[in-house]
Image (cartoon, rainbow, N blue to C red):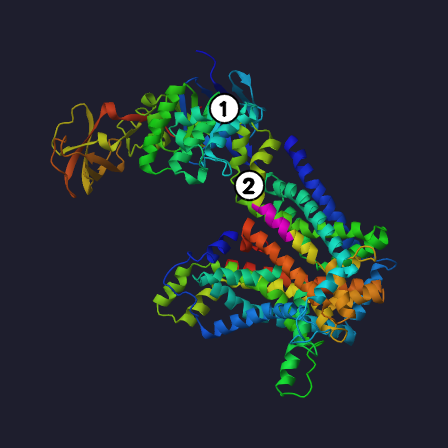
Amino acid sequence: MSQTVKQGASPAAGHGTSHGMRPRHPVAGTLAVAGYVVMIVPILFVVATAFTAGSTLRFPPEGLSLKWFGEAVAYTPFVEAVVSSLELAVLATGLALLLGVPVTLAIHRGRIPGKGLLEGLFLSPLVVPELVVGLALYQQLMIGLHLDNFTTLLLGHTALLLPYAVRVTGASLALTDPALEEAARGLGASPLRAFVTVTLPMLRPGLISAGLLGFVTSFNNVPLSLLLQTRDFRTLPVTMLDYVQQSYDPMVAAASTLVLAATVVVAVIAERTVGFAKIFGGINR
Amino acid sequence: MTTPAAELVGVSQRFGGFTAVDAIDLQIPRGRLTTLLGPSGCGKTTTLRLLAGYSAPTSGRILIDGDDATRTPPEKRNLGMVFQSYALFPHLTVADNVAYGPKMRGVPAAERRRRADEALDLVGLAHLGDRKPKQLSGGQQQRVALARAIAIRPRLLLLDEPLSNLDARLRVQMRAEIRRIQSETGLTVVLVTHDQDEALELSDEMVLMRAGKIVQSGAPRDVFPAPADRFVAEFLGYENFLTLADGRQAAVRPEHLRIVSADAPAGEAVAFDAVVRDVAYRGVDLLVTLEATDPGGHAVRLLADHRADTATGPTPSAGDRVRLLAPEARLALLEPDPTPTEGIS
Amino acid sequence: MRARSSLLLLLLPGLAFLLVGFLLPAVAMLFAPPGVTFPQVLERLGAMLTDPYDLGIIWRTVRIGLIVTALCVVLGFPIASLLARSQSRWAGVLLALAIFPLLLSNVVRTFGWLVVLGSNGVIGQLLTGLGIVEEAPQLLYTELAIVLGLTQLFLPLAVITCYSAVAQVDPGLDEAARGLGASRTRAFWSILVPLSLPGIVVAATLVFAGSVTAYTTPYLLGGSSQRMLSTQLFSYASVTVDWAAASATAIVMTVLVFLVSGISTLVGRKGATS
């Protein structure tokens, strides 16, 4: 599937005559434009209001200034939340890859009965609503077992990211000729050495995709994290959500713009490493 | 004779209810080229993989140089395997691919490089060491795979359908190349193929397999004129099957059937009357389809090659009544077909 | 056998995390919320399914889910088919632009609508500024706001899913249909749409499941007047701390998602066999 995404995205691909971007049908064209307006325009307004000199969220902004950016980066709850969210996202992503890659190997390379069932089990966190999972973890682990909220968040986020790790690296592995590992073994490599010198380099694009996707998913998560917040450890999206609910000033617009800028950086990294469209190619096949 | 380079003793491989290899005994003679030949699903690749150690047999023993290697993992067998897909490591250069085996054996870098160059030189690719596999043509990739397998100085060289991904012209070239490398290195080679021409041309020893069993083996010169049964005969390109007057089955190749005029004498040949149904022009010869009643009294459809330059009789055309001569020396007498459950090994 | 045990070694750590971080708590929540028994949860669930207020929330959630799904398919499929069939170099850029929001925080994306729909927002200012209305209409905290917000949120998902489906349809088929006398519109409806239907079904399922479980959007754009199941669940769990009600709401939400996934799988299977 990732292949078809790439194929379609490349301008040289495709058949036939030079239709170019000539609208195929006025109705389809209009709907497409409407779609892009809904997807993109609200984000542009966030950026525009962030640079206001005024003190309310109004449009057009009253004068131009960077003062709300200054406020946002000096606002302790935001700064602390950024650190917490980064910490959580990095750890959860790392753990999910560390646990998920062996699972992928077992599913794709091992001769085991019930492979489909096993894969389904590891994909199951995608099926249950995250808010429900959050409620379950809150009730059972934080209240029931008195786990602290960081541990609970880490467990929950890792379980949530496991499907990404298993599926995306699995897609990479499925594209790899199993004979490569056999060839390495035949040339004298032990199973572990064959994995490190041959399989792992083959998995690189999958690992990067799963890593980026996992990081972004964890960092942005609200529903799963929502009930698992405490005063000591709060994640950024939930902190921003609460702030918006209480006060209605452009500081959140500035913070949002900073998040947007960081996301653009992530997107550029994604494009440079494995190709932007490919990253999402493997996730919903 | 010395110890065989490898030996399979009563080896079976079952996957669930399916028996891929069925209690075969096989000796691989040292310093020779042995081919495992058969249609897809006959167990030839499974046999090669058992030999290489990529799967363990359900029962039986595998000896390499006389030592039991049945449970030895592939990395400890020191056999050079060339995969059908070549399995070149795409992230490594050609030279690093070839040096991979020596590296796993702890050979120092300089010596590795020398060995890789030597192996690449043997296959005529010494100048392409810095390329990535993807930058090479199919034929070049094939040679790299060979060089990589040779660079570990293997006890056996195992080739799994090495030529099947090449185009026809290249395939013929590579056959000669494989023969040359085998004779230059003196390696024991086992080659899996489904192409009888390839097997005939390359083999010192050919082993025909069907349904997990060995049906016939021997030197091409011995096997080709005397296929053991109809399966082998068909596989080796015998097109015509006859029942003789005494009830025995025989096979004869199209180029050995002679078309003569209906009143010509039989001589040292089995003779019978036939009607020409179709004549197809093929440049060097005519491919003639005939209907006849064989000496055993069965109606048969036969193919005969008719070369205008060497044939004595008239040029056949559709509807002609002719006489067919099958020289006795060219008739391959067949054993009756075995029932599927019993083997001949 | 050695291979068996090493396989187990590969699987076990992942399985352990999956059990502790997801499966066991999820099951335990159903049967043993703190201080509540399972029959009490069921009783609360029964009450919920007869109470007009609760039923209203369920119905609103389903209604919004259906509208958003329809909008995402209607807007997303044209985008996907135009991009997948275009040879322009801009198609890649536009595709990236459609996918990019998937990386961006939902909070940031939803926040944009506060700026657009708020009382001092873009639309209000525009309408009053042009003298069309005297007072900016109440756009925020309406179902319309939620629908817009969720459509923005899930449209990229619909686009990329439909895109993969369309890209798998041989462009030669369109051309063959045109050659046989079908108009562009006719070829679209008779060839492209039926052949990419499995992808459309998947897209619709993902969008619906996402919409009926999303929290950020109804929280920010719906407020307390336009409760959906998700905001209601949060309120039970953290404001009123009514575990039975929270569990019951969670069950309704999960069943809703499973039901739709199940139906879509059945539809997909039927489509595959026919």
Q: Mark 1 points at which residue?
A: B152
On residue A181, which mark appears? none
Q: What residue type is labelled 1?
A: Ile
- Inspect the image, locate mark 2, and give the three-letter code of the amino acid beneath it: Met
Q: How crowded is mark 1: few (under 14 residues within 10 Å), some or many (20 or more)?
A: many
Residue B259 spot, x, y in % from top left: 17, 33
Is residue A212 highlighted in magenta? yes
Q: Quadrant of the N terminus of chain C?
A: top right
A46 relative to C192 in the view: left or right: right
Q: Can residue B258 be seen in this view?
A: yes
Q: Residue at x 59, y 35 (%)?
A: A195
Depth order, front residue of C172/B224: C172
Q: Residue at x 46, y 54 (%)?
A: A7
Q: Characterize the magenta stretch by its predominant secondary structure.
A: helix
Q: Which residue is drawn at 71% across and 66% down?
A: A67
Q: Is residue B264 left or right of residue A95?
A: left
**Residue numbers of the magenta segment:** A205-213
**Place of residue A143 in the rendered image (x, y in percent of width and height, measured from the top left):** 85, 55
**What chain is tagged by disc 1?**
B
